[in-house]
Amino acid sequence: MSVTNQQIAAIFQQMADILSILDGDHFRILSFQKSARIIEELVDDLASIGPDEKMLAGIQGIGKGTAQRIAEFLRTGQIKDHQDLLAQIPPGLPALLGISGMGPKTVALLWREAGVDSIDTLKSKLESDGLTGIKGLGPKKIENLKQSLTFAASSETKRRRLGDALMLANWFLTELRKMPGVKDANYAGSLRRGKETIGDIDLLVAADDKHAQAISDAFVKLDLVETILAQGKTKSSVRVAPTAGGMQVDLRVLEPESYGAALLYFTGSKEHNVRLRELAIKQGMKLNEYALTRDDKPVASKTETDIYRALGLDYIPPELREDHGEIALATEGKLPELVRVEDIAAELHCHTDASDGSLTILEMAMLAIERGFHTIAITDHSKSQTVANGLSEERLEQHILAVREVAKQLKGRINLLVGSEVDILADGKLDYSNSLLKELDIVVASPHHALNQDPAKATKRLLKAIENPYVSIIGHPTGRIINRRPGLSPDMKQLFHAAAQRGVALEINANHYRLDLRDTHARAAIEAGVKLAIDTDAHGVSDFDQLIYGVLTARRAGATKADVVNCMSADALKKWIASTRK
DNA sequence: GCCGTTTTCGGCCCGACTGTTTTCAGTCG
């Protein structure tokens, strides 16, 4: 039996859910939730660590109790405390917590007073008016529950991809900035932290108090708004039309004086905020969304930098605010200088109309020149990718000549490399022979099919590709598509070790459907000494704009310029590519 | 349940909005 971290995390989350319905100790519930989060974000496979309680308890945030329970699960396949909790409630009850407006107290109330034990019984009770007359449950609450259920059934509850959320947020910001009295406007939340998926969009506006009501009123009347979920003077919540993605968008209006404190607060993460507030308390201060104060007198509030400084910290970029050790680094002045979009000077993975792209070789090169890049590598698909019009050996030979010809025309305005995104076949062999790969300037090797093979096979497959003497970059190493398919789950530690040894770079594919490597894997890769490549995998004109998503992911991983091969000078890049080909 | 540069015990972040209440609990972020 192979156990995934996700499965174990789900058990701790469920223990937290059941405890909350049973009105258990609040901090114990928080602790289970925290354990679930830590386990889910862990790069190491718990199953491969094994039931070693000392090792497990060494993980930050995992204590003795949780370590014991994980070990118990690894040994026996279940956890007694979990089974005991399950026995105390109907199995369909925890799912009710997923409905907006249903917290643990309401779930417990409906269960005890009306026999609601699942989403289905809740549905039928609502339809037959079986919930009227329950104390604490008025007609408005019942109406809201009906609406929440309709929404939950419409499958619009999934977290949205980063790119979709960013576009929507920018639309709202443009509208808000036009409104009278708006001095500043930003998005906050997980979007500002650059997470790969976004639950809902948090918007902040700086405006004097006298304008707040008018701004909130105008916000809920904007074109894309379909439903108003809440509306106050300084805080409003809406849902946009399904055609615009159906996301929830929250707006907070704040005095300019409090804007930095609010930005800090609403950017989160929650865990980062808790740490900051603890730090404030230790120093005799208090932090909330309005200000950092001492004895109720403001110490700092206008900018985030002011507040961090007053706490004795360097400014922490939003992408690092996940309580992954960034506060300790900021205390010591050791935060990494994160890579920026403007540091990227080369595109090493893109497609032309020779395979499944829409632009010619020349058009692609011109786009890269416009961006100020010194190098672009043309990497069309290999022959197995028949659906993507992958190049046969003969066509690749011609393609090489065609790229060289365009390079001549460009007269050194950019280094135009000819390469291939060669398929890593299911057994780890590449889709072209080594003698053909040798003719290319650069080889990106990527998995495209057999993406649900078992982890051991996937590990072998990718290790074999890394060992190929002509491969410089492993493209989208897992092949996952966000919200659609999980992709391969190889032993990442082994891949990182091999890639670091051989000097091969692993890609962060910047396409917001992929973001592969994901943030946590990229972080572990850097720690293992692996170089990253941030590439857009461009197929058309607008795809270069996806670079930001790849850079955000790299920043979440703590990547600096030195970690990313696309940031090298033209000469250094040339040397690096040569060093990977032996 | 977790944790320790005041602590191995006693803390553990904070506020807005809603709905159902006569002063506050629940939910959410």
Image (cartoon, rainbow, N blue to C red):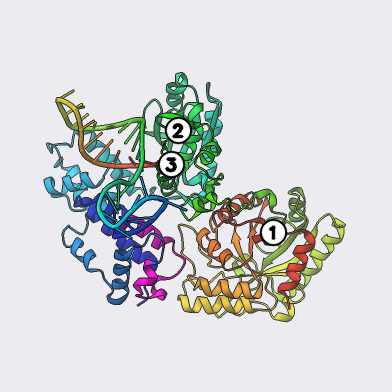
> Which mark is drawn over residue A566?
1
Give the mark toward the camera: 1 or 2: 2
Say which label, 3 or 2, has the lower sequence index: 3
Three-letter code for the amino acid on which mark 3 is drawn? Gln
Three-letter code for the amino acid on which mark 2 is drawn? Ala
Element class at badge 3:
loop
Say which label, 1 or 2, has the lower sequence index: 2
Judge left or right: residue A52 versus residue A573. left
Q: The numbered mark 2 sits on a residue in which chain?
A: A
Is residue A384 something that shows in the picture? no
Q: The numbered mark 1 sits on a residue in which chain?
A: A
Say which label, 3 or 1, has the lower sequence index: 3
Whole-percent x and y of residue A226?
A: 41, 35
Image vertical order of residue A572 relative to residue A283, above or below: below
Estimate how packed mark 2 is, as few (under 14), some (14 to 19) or many (20 or more) residues with alpha carbons within 10 Å: many
Q: Quick check: is A229 in the magenta stretch?
A: no
Q: Disc 2 designates what residue?
A: A291
Judge left or right: residue A75 versus residue A196. left
Most foreground residue, A152 or A550: A550
The residue positioned 46% from the left and 72% from the top of the image is A452
Most foreground residue, A255 or A433: A255
| Start-end of magenta stretch | A32-57
Three-letter code for the amino acid on which mark 1 is drawn? Asn
Mark 3 vs mark 1: same chain?
Answer: yes
Image vertical order of residue A65 relative to residue A279, above or below: below
Most foreground residue, B24 or A106: B24
Q: Disc 3 designates what residue?
A: A283
Give the mark toward the camera: 3 or 2: 3
